[in-house]
Image (cartoon, rainbow, N blue to C red):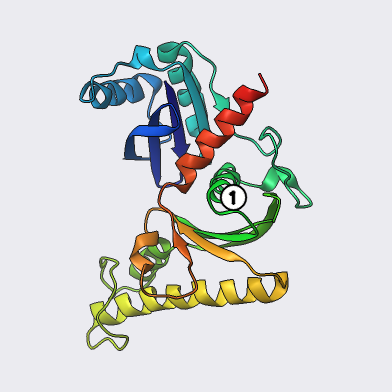
């Protein structure tokens, strides 16, 4: 079995594969101080509920954007799975060109998303990943990563309002029933929600105009579903894109021996 781990700034997703399809997918908050033993204790309980054990894992692949976590994840793989994990980097993904001046600056999450999106939907593409940051990643017709846009995530913006303004409360992010808010909470919710819809639409429109070729738009990420039905700029909402990308990279690496 393969264990695929995607460590984001806020949440981490861990998927167990038997064959080409994930049999289990788990989500946890990201903690840079969680040790290998703590990961193992958490995982063993979840795997036991599906009749599996840590010893069943034969391979491990990791996409990580939190450098402090990598030491513990390597130890997890070596100590409990008996293997060195394959850690995604800008220069070790078979069949993927990174067409930016400094390829090392391409985040692992953005590269994995590019692979997952291209495998399922072809190219060229705009991949909109809504998480801690809102990424707009460009995937070429041949699957190459060609750069993109990074904007603050919607949760960061809501948190900034609360932290910087003494009288603004902490509120939940949800789609408001109308644009004009009639109280403080409603005004904050509609400002952040429709402000982000406008950001997404505006950036997509500008990318398409600059790229000057037809492009599909695929949305993913922890809160992407919040915008489903709120904009016509997104062609496909694909919650499994990152995990699919990790599995595809694993297959390519294994094929190369």
Horizontal side of 230 relative to 199 (left or right) equals left
Residue 64 in view in this figure: no
Location of mark 1 (residue): 118
- From the viewer's side, name the closer residue of 76 and 247: 247
Give the image location of residue 109, x and y in percent: 54, 45
Quarter of the image containing the C terminus? top right
Give the image location of residue 220, x and y in percent: 45, 55
Please identify the quarter of the rendering in which residue 147 is found: bottom right
Mark 1 element type: helix
- From the viewer's side, name the closer residue of 84 and 145: 145
- From the viewer's side, name the closer residue of 255 and 67: 255
Q: Which residue is depicted at the point 27% across and 66% down?
A: 170
Give the image location of residue 167, x and y in percent: 27, 76
Quarter of the image containing the N terminus? top left
Please identify the quarter of the rendering in which residue 230 is found: bottom left
Q: Is residue 65 above or below residue 229?
A: above
Q: Is residue 13 above or below residue 60?
A: below
Horizontal side of 95 relative to 154 (left or right) equals right
Horizontal side of 243 relative to 27 (left or right) equals right
Horizontal side of 96 relative to 136 (left or right) equals right
Residue 107 in view in this figure: yes
Task: Determine crowd level at label 1: few under 14, some 14-19, many 20+ residues with C-alpha closer than 10 A.
Answer: many
């Amino acid at each position: 079995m393969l264990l695929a781990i995607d460590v984001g700034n806020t949440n981490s997703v861990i998927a167990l594969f038997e064959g080409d399809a994930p049999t289990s997918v788990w989500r946890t908050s990201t903690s840079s101080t969680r040790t290998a033993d703590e990961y193992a204790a958490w995982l063993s309980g979840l795997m036991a509920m599906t009749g599996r054990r840590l010893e069943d894992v034969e391979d491990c692949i990791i996409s990580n954007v939190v450098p402090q976590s990598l030491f513990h994840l390597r130890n997890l793989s070596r100590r409990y799975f008996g293997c060195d994990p394959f850690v995604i980097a800008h220069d070790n993904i078979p069949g993927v060109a990174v067409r930016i001046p400094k390829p090392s600056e391409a985040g692992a999450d953005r590269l994995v998303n590019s692979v997952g999106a291209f495998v399922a939907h072809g190219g060229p593409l705009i991949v909109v990943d809504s998480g801690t940051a809102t990424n707009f990643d460009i995937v070429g017709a041949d699957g190459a990563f060609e750069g993109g846009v990074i904007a603050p995530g919607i949760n960061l913006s809501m948190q900034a309002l609360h932290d910087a303004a003494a009288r603004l409360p902490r509120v939940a992010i949800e789609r408001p029933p109308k644009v004009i808010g009639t109280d403080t909470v409603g005004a904050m919710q509609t400002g952040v929600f429709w402000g982000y819809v406008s950001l997404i639409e505006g950036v997509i429109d500008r990318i398409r105009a600059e790229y000057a070729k037809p492009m599909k738009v695929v949305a993913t990420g922890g809160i992407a579903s919040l915008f489903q039905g709120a904009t016509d700029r997104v062609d496909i909402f694909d919650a499994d894109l990152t995990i699919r990308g990790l599995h595809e990279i694993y297959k390519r690496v294994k094929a190369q021996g």
